[in-house]
Image (cartoon, rainbow, N blue to C red):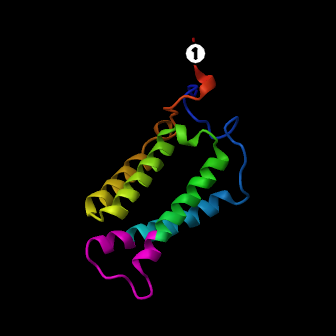
């Protein structure tokens, strides 16, 4: 049984979905992981692979991440009220800080945050921590 603060996999929170969403997300995650690894290598002093610029790598990280966020928002209108959604916002904040102050600390912070939340139980990832306006009980 789920509490009223958990996002179910189906039901009232699904506004819309994209045909083939699962495989699109797999492809986007793959691009995202490759780009994140390349970005980490650059931050640690490795040269970029031939034909890969730092701007292209950063764009691939941001573009794939925002595309995954858009698909999650289409499927779950309350996504940004959950632990997973708030984590995405925190990672965007860390990315902005990293763009201003390119220090490995910000990169590793985003990696650790991602690893912990993505491997947490579903009941934690989908827990709605910011109630909707109509959720007030009294």
Residue with the mark numbered 1: 137
| Quadrant showing the N terminus | top right
Q: Secondary structure at mark 1?
A: loop
- Judge from the rendering whether residue 121 lies leftward or rightward of residue 78; answer left or right: left
Whether 48 is among the magenta residues is yes
Q: Residues within 10 Å of mark 1 (few under 14, many from 20)?
A: few
* The magenta segment: 38-58
**As drawn, is 15 to the left or to the right of 123?**
right
Asked whether 127 or 70 is in front, the reply is 70
Residue 99 rendering spot, x and y as whole percentages = 37, 64
Question: How many numbered circles are shown?
Answer: 1
Residue situated furthest front in the rendering? 100
Question: Vertically, is 114 above or below 38?
Answer: above
**Residue at (32% x, 74% y) in the render:** 42
The picture places residue 116, in percent across and down from the top left corner, at 37, 48
Q: Residue at 69% x, 42% y: name it.
A: 14
Picture coordinates of residue 49, whole percent (x, y): 39, 84
Residue drawn at point x = 26 percent, y = 71 percent: 44
132 versus 39 height, above or below: above
Towards the viewer: 101 or 60:
101
Return the residue found at the far top.
Answer: 138
Report the residue at 44% width, 70% height from top: 58
Answer above or below: position of 102 versus 53: above
- In which image quadrant can residue 21 be found? bottom right
Judged from this view, the residue extending furthest toward the bottom is: 50
Q: Say whether residue 103 is magenta.
A: no
Residue 54 location, x and y as percent? 40, 76
- Point out the image quarter for the C terminus: top right
Of 97 and 47, which appears nearest the observer? 97
Q: Is residue 31 above or below residue 72?
A: below
């Amino acid at each position: 049984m789920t509490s009223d603060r958990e996002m179910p996999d189906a039901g009232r929170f699904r506004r819309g979905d994209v045909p083939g969403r699962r495989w699109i997300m797999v492809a986007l995650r793959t691009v995202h992981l490759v780009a994140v690894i390349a970005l980490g290598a650059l931050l640690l002093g490795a040269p970029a692979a031939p034909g890969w610029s730092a701007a292209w790598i950063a764009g691939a990280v941001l573009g794939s991440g925002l595309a995954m966020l858009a698909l999650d928002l289409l499927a779950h209108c309350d996504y940004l009220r959950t632990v997973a959604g708030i984590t995405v916002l925190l990672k965007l904040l860390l990315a902005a800080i990293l763009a201003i102050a390119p220090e490995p600390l910000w990169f590793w912070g985003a990696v650790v945050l991602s690893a912990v939340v993505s491997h947490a139980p579903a009941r934690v990832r989908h827990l709605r921590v910011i109630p909707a306006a109509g959720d007030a009980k009294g």
